[in-house]
Amino acid sequence: MSLTGFQRRRRQLAKRKALEEQKKQEEVKKLSIDDMTKEEIIKKLEEKGIEYNPRDKKEVLFNLLVGD
C-alpha cells in the first residue's frame, strides 16, 4: 500500500470513529435520568450486558449506562 493508501485508510478510520462518537452522544441526549425509572435503567443495562450492583443508586446505574 502506498503512502496515499495509508493516509486514505487513516481518514476512513477517523471518520468512522467520529460517526461512532456522534451516535454515542445522540444516544446520551436521548437518555435522561429524569425520564427513566431505576427499573428501566436496569433493563437497559441487562440488554447491553453491563454488570451492575442492583443496590446501587439510580445515578450510579445511569452513569454505567451512558459510560461516564
Image (spheres, rainbow, N blue to C red):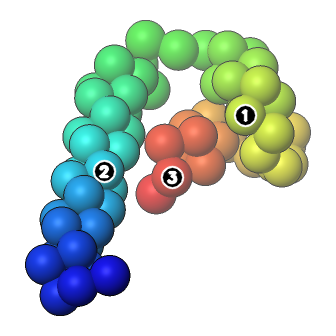
- In front: label 2 or label 1: 2
Cα–Cα span, label 2 and label 1: 21 Å
Rate crowding at label 1 as few (under 14), some (14 to 19) or many (20 or more) other CA atoms within 10 Å. few
- 32 horizontally vs 41: left or right: left
Residue at x-position 35% and y-position 45%: 20
Residue at x-position 81% and y-position 39%: 49
The mark that comes first in sequence, 2 or 1, is 2
> Which residue, as the protein is rendered here, is positioned at the far bottom?
3
Cα–Cα span, label 2 and label 3: 19 Å
Give the answer, above or below, for where 52 lies relative to 49.
below
Q: Position of residue 11 (x, y in %)?
A: 17, 65
Give the answer, above or below, for where 18 lies relative to 65.
below
Whether residue 1 appears in this view of the structure is: yes
Q: Dot 3 corresponds to which residue?
A: 67
* Numbered disc 1: secondary structure: helix
Q: Position of residue 68 (x, y in %)?
A: 46, 57
The mark that comes first in sequence, 2 or 3, is 2
Q: Quadrant of residue 39?
A: top right
- In front: label 1 or label 3: 1
Q: Dot 1 corresponds to which residue?
A: 48
Three-letter code for the amino acid on which mark 3 is drawn: Gly
Closest to the observer: 27 or 36? 27
Closest to the observer: 18 or 27? 18
Residue at x-position 73% and y-position 34%: 48
The mark that comes first in sequence, 1 or 3, is 1
Q: Which mark is residue 16?
A: 2
